[in-house]
Amino acid sequence: MALDLDQIRSTAARVAASHGLEVVELEFHGGAKHRLLRVFIEKNAAERARLAAVAEQDAVKLPVNISLDQLAGVTHEDCERFSQDFGTVIDVEDLIPGSSEYTLEVSSPGLDRKLNRLEDYQRFAGSLVKVQTFTPMAGNRHWQGRIINAGEAGIVMDVSVVKKKKGKAGAEDARAVTIPLSNIEKANLVPEI
């Protein structure tokens, strides 16, 4: 029986939804005896909205440029409950052949979380990000800046907020750059603490 990552992903999403969580990313590494299934979870949009309302009511102060909606808000208990339930479903439904020999790791996506979907870019508008493109744009594959806007055409970043290195080739005078979503190889938030 072959490993079906799409089935594992949809099962993880179903289990996460039952806990008011959302699967951000799922990774499977290794083979034979040393296999690792890593799942990154966060509160789903409804739960984030509820937490934001509670925080506003209690006048909770957050660091600059961060809203509670942007934070995952995942606790160790959330990870533990999801891990127990999801691990049981994996074993019962035999989603990982030879499932007694794998490690399940569950965590939050972290402060430097990956951005994968258009919704991620829209949610984190105003945040500082690092983006690596498949093909160079203005002679550069590595970009860092603040997300101004995100849409079907791509993301617009203000790159003037980052100090340029001396002698660095590329678009030194550019204040904003538009990167098509199809050209983004990887993107991560840059923690601002």
Image: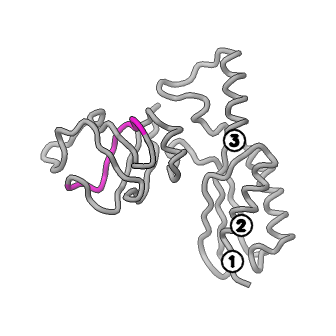
Q: Which residue is drawn at 53% across and 45% down?
A: 120
Residue kind at label 1, given as amino acid type = Leu
- Characterize the magenta stretch by its predominant secondary structure: strand
Q: Position of residue 64 (x, y in %)?
A: 48, 24
Q: Where does label 2 land, which residue? A: 8
Q: Position of residue 101 (x, y in %)?
A: 74, 75
Disc on the earlier residue, 3 or 1:
1
Whether residue 86 is visible to the viewer of this picture, yes or no, is: yes
Quick check: marks 3 and 2 in contact, CB under 8 Å?
no
Q: Which contiguous range is marked in magenta? A: 139-149
The answer to whether residue 28 is above or below residue 18 is below
Q: In this view, does 117 lie to the left or right of 57?
A: left
Q: In this view, does 112 lie to the left or right of 81?
A: left
SS of the residue under disc 2: helix
Residue 3, which numbered label?
1
Q: Where does label 3 land, which residue? A: 43
The answer to whether residue 122 is above or below residue 98 is above
Q: Which residue is drawn at 44% across and 35% down?
A: 127
Disc on the earlier residue, 1 or 2:
1
- From mark 3 to mark 1, how far is it between C-alphas? 27 Å
The answer to whether residue 131 is above or below residue 7 is above
Which quadrant would residue 158 be assigned to in this image?
A: top left
Residue kind at label 3, given as amino acid type = Lys
Quick check: marks 1 and 2 in contact, CB under 8 Å?
yes
Residue 100, which numbered label?
none
Q: Where is residue 68 in the image (x, y as percent from the top left)?
A: 61, 29
Disc on the earlier residue, 3 or 2:
2
Q: Looking at the figure, which quarter contains the N terminus? A: bottom right
SS of the residue under disc 3: strand
| Front one among 33 and 2 | 2
Q: Which residue lies furthest to the bottom in this view?
A: 1
Whether residue 77 is visible to the viewer of this picture, yes or no, is: no
